[in-house]
Amino acid sequence: MGPRAPGVGNVTLARKRRLAAHGFTVAALAAWAAYSASIPSYQVPGPVSVARRATVFVTDRFAFAHLAYSVAHVASAIICGFVLGTALVLLAHYVPVFRLLIHGRITPFLNSFSGIGWTLLAVLWFGVNDVTVVFAITAVLLPFSIVNMREGLDSLDPELLEMGQSFGRSRWRNFRKIVLPALSPFIFASLRVCFGVAWKVTLTAELFGGSAGLGYLVNVAREEFDTPMIFAAIGLIVLFVHLTDRHFLTPLQAHVVRRYRAA
């Protein structure tokens, strides 16, 4: 028996991994279908009924509008959380007098405060509206942005920064040419973490403090015992987060990192 061609082992391993992953998915769906057949549908509907109910997000403008509201809430909160968190980290890094305040006081407080607590407070402060939802999500995302971006700044090579300062006096140019490329992996890591966490918080924030969105739709479905809609909304979030992270954020991160490394 001759030697294997280069890469054959890797291809075989990749196929086995795909088969294992797909097999688990099929087994989970089969178990779900079998269990749902043995109990009332209002408790756990079957995957077929949930899939049929999920089509409402394509055929019904009302349901699609709530989906669009949730996407807008998540996008707004990620932008606010990332920009504010990065600003706090840069302030602590370049103005050391604020370092203990931000990393020793503000970050531990934000990191320990409950997302439901932020939602309830936001309802008291702003009422039941979009501002409440975006505020609650942003407050939960802030510590994730702060921790990731702080790790990025702490990992900068001081010799490289010193060399950049010796070749040019412009701090903005050094930041753009040296610091920002080095931070790119941490920026994408922060955005990817915030994207997943935001969708986890969004459902709760819209459920208690929103007047639109998937969380609001789930609340209405709960009152009407429309369990397939609840499962459909949750399944749609899981599918959307997975596909966006795998087919958009991950390739974009790899492209940006390769580009900066080549530069």
Image (cartoon, rainbow, N blue to C red):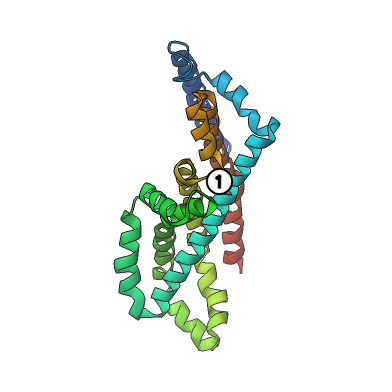
The C terminus lies in quadrant? bottom right
Comparing 213 with 171, the one in front is 213
- Is 72 above or below relative to 8? below
Q: Quadrant of residue 122?
A: bottom left
Closer to the camera in the image, 8 or 184: 184
Location of residue 4 by image quarter: top right
Amino acid type at mark 1: Asp
* Rendered location of residue 33, percent (x, y): 49, 16
Does residue 187 lie above or below 49 as drawn? below
Residue count near mark 1 (Cα–Cα under 10 Å), binned few <14, some 14–19, many ≥20: some
Residue at image location 35% in from the left, 79% down from the top = 96
Camera sees residue 182: yes
Q: Residue furthest top?
A: 38
**Total marks drawn?**
1
Q: Residue at x 52, y 83 (%)?
A: 171
Q: Which residue is mark 1?
A: 245
Instruction: Examine the rendered structure and indicate whether residue 169 appears above or below residue 193.
Output: below
Describe residue 241's horizontal placement relative to residue 55 as left or right: left
Residue 73: where, in percent of width, then height? 55, 50
From the top left corner, tell me how far across and down residue 196 is, in percent.
Answer: 48, 46
In which quadrant of the rendered image does the N terminus lie? top right
Residue 20 makes an appearance in the image = no
* Identity of the residue drawn at 54% across and 59% down: 79
At 45% from the left and 83% from the top, the residue drawn is 162
Rendered location of residue 121, percent (x, y): 39, 53
